[in-house]
Structures are given as C-alpha cells and as structure tokens.
Image: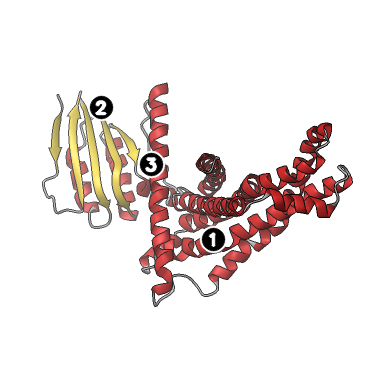
Amino acid sequence: MGVRDRSPPMSEPIQMERAVEGGEVRLRLRGRLDRQAAPLVLEWLRTWLPGAGETARLDLGEVEYLDSAGVAVLSEALRLARERRQSLVFSRLSEPARRTLEIFRWQGVDLEAPEKTGLLEGLGERVLQAFEGLRQIGMLAADTFSWALAGPFTARPGHPRGEIVRQSILLGSRAFGIVALLSLLIGLTLALLSAAQLRQFGANIYAANLVAVAMTREMGPLLTAVIVAGRSGSAIAAEIATMRVTEEIDALESMGFSPVRFLVVPKLYAVTMTQPLLTLVADACGVLGGMLVGALLLQVPMPAFLLQCADALRTKDLLIGLLKSLSFGWIILLTGAHCGLRTQGGAQGVGISTTRSVVLSIFLVIVADCAFSLAFYS
C-alpha cells in the first residue's frame, strides 16, 4: 500500500504530489511551472527525491505551462538525481511542456516506455478519440456559425477588410478550371457507360436522363467536394496549422481576437458563396460531356439531348444537389480548421494535420452523402 503526500499550500500556482509504491517514489506536478513556482518546486524536489540507488518517476502530464525557469528546474532535478546516483524517469509530458522542451531542444527527458495495449483496448481508444474529435468539430461549428450570424450586427469587423473576397477567389474561382475539366470527363464517362447498355434496346436518348440526374443529384456535388477537399481543404488546414506552430494564433488571442472569428468565419462566408456555384459549373460541364457523346456516338442531336435532360430533371433534383454541395463545403471547411487548430509540434505537425484534414474531409463528405441519399430516397 503506497504512502502519499501532497504539497499543503493550495493557493500556490503549482501543486506537487508524492507517492511511494513498491519502494518507488512517484512525483506528480500539477499547474504552472513558471518563474514564480520554480524555487518552490526545486525545494520540493530536493526534499522528496529518494536516496542513492532508488528510482523516482516525475509525472509532467498535468503541467499547464512551462517556461525557461521550469526547464532549468527539470535540468537541476536531473543533476541532483545523478549526484545521488538515482534513476529519474519522466513518465508523461503534457503538450505545453513538450512544446517548450522542443523550443529549447532539450534532450534530457528520459520517458518511460508506454504500456502495451491489447487489440480491444486499442480499438476502444480509437473509437473514443473519434467521438472526441466529432465533439470538437461540433463545438467549432457552433462557435463558427454563432460568429458568422452575429458578424453583420457587430460594429467592429472580426476580419481584415477584403478578406471575404480574397478567400472567395482562393477557394472558389481558382478551382473553376479543375472542377469544369473533371466534370466534363465524368459526364463523358457516364454517357459512354450508359450507351453500351442502352443501344441494345434502341434507347439511346435515355442516356440524357442518366447523365442529367446523376450529375445534378450525386456526381456534381460529390466530385466538387472531393476536389475542394484536396485543393482548398488542405490549404485551409496548412494555413491555420502553420499559424498555430508559429504562435500567430496565440498572438491573436493575446490581443483579444477570436481565432475562429478572424480566421474561420471569412472562409465560411466564402465557401457558402462559392461551393454551390462550383457545383452548378460541375453539373453543366457534366451534361455537356454527355451531350458530346450523344452527338458523336449515339446519333442524338444536341437540342434533343438538352430537351431530354430538361424533361428528366425536376426542381427537387437541383435543390437537393445544391443542399448537398453547401453541406459538403461546410464539412470541408470545419474539418480543415479543426485539424489546423489542433496541430502539435513543428513542420512535421503541419504535414500531419494537412493529410488528416483531406482524409477526414472526404470520409465525412461520403458519410454525409449516404445520409442525404437515405433521407431523400423515394
């Protein structure tokens, strides 16, 4: 049975807990390890570190802040352990502590090897992490939409002048070419695949129905979303992640700016305006590709193809496609912003966040597409 001691002054910015379990001393720091707390922590360590030949584990998993004075305390703790011929192991590192130690390029941390988890434990941990990520994206969505709705009624704008126009150009107009080209090719492919079957029954004209409905309700919004996720979603994640690792977001917060209002809301306005327009471009180019196949291979005149498309389409089909495209655009934006804001580490962390943003965005878009298909099935 272990013996536990706690530091008595609860008003201090940092608390220290000591436990003796199986002949091993376990020390835990909780709070801010800064210049004010450094002398007190150093005195605690000198008093509570064990004798020669014993092992001590220092838990830094609940350290909320670490500055240069705290790094000096950790270096002194290692020096004391070497003098007393002890083994001092750091069992955990919080993210603030890890970031500070990376800045100082401090190589003194001897981390305890993580415990191996079983298959079911690992699966359960992944599921919990997935739900936590969805919860954080939901909170970010609530914060973003609240700022977006309140923005027009506030006296001070939360973003630089002209930022919405700049984001609309970056996220919308510059994606026009690739969306149009790929949609044209998809329309060609759909018409070719349908022609091989329909010509057996002399129903070449119905290729127009397939291309029009498929592009408007499904392929147009989905293809546009995949292109935007790979092109614009990755750019959003990389931009915000770079600002996170270079501490620009911390500077915004210290000046009283909300990072969500300053960085995410202008992109939300831009995506809301440009995503449906890109989807309409994709629909038109897809129908154009099908019309070219109809005229060249199916002997269906272009006016007849267009009339057949108009007969096949309903207003509901167009509205469903636009609703999908708008929802997909919001999903891509919020996922990219979430991954960027949660970036950890340096340049490697930016790459990881960018990759995660693209993969997660496409996954959530496909899940949402399935949900829409079930909801509007008739």
* Residue lying farthest to the left in this orientation: 8
Residue type at the position of mark 3: Glu
Residue situated in front as seen by the camera: 188 or 29:
188
Q: Residues within 10 Å of mark 1 (few under 14, many from 20)?
A: some
Q: Within the image, what quadrant is residue 62 found in?
A: top left
Q: Which residue is mark 2?
A: 53
Question: Which quadrant: the C terminus?
Answer: top right
Residue type at the position of mark 1: Thr
Q: Which mark is residue 239?
A: none
Relative to 121, say whether 244 is above or below: below
Q: Is residue 179 visible?
A: no
Identify the secondary structure beneath mark 1.
Answer: helix
Identify the secondary structure beneath mark 2.
Answer: loop
Q: How many angstroms separate mark 1 from mark 2 (CA)?
A: 65 Å
Q: Could you tell me if the residues under marks 3 and 1 are in contact, i.e. CB atoms within 8 Å?
A: no
Image x and y of residue 363, in percent: 54, 40
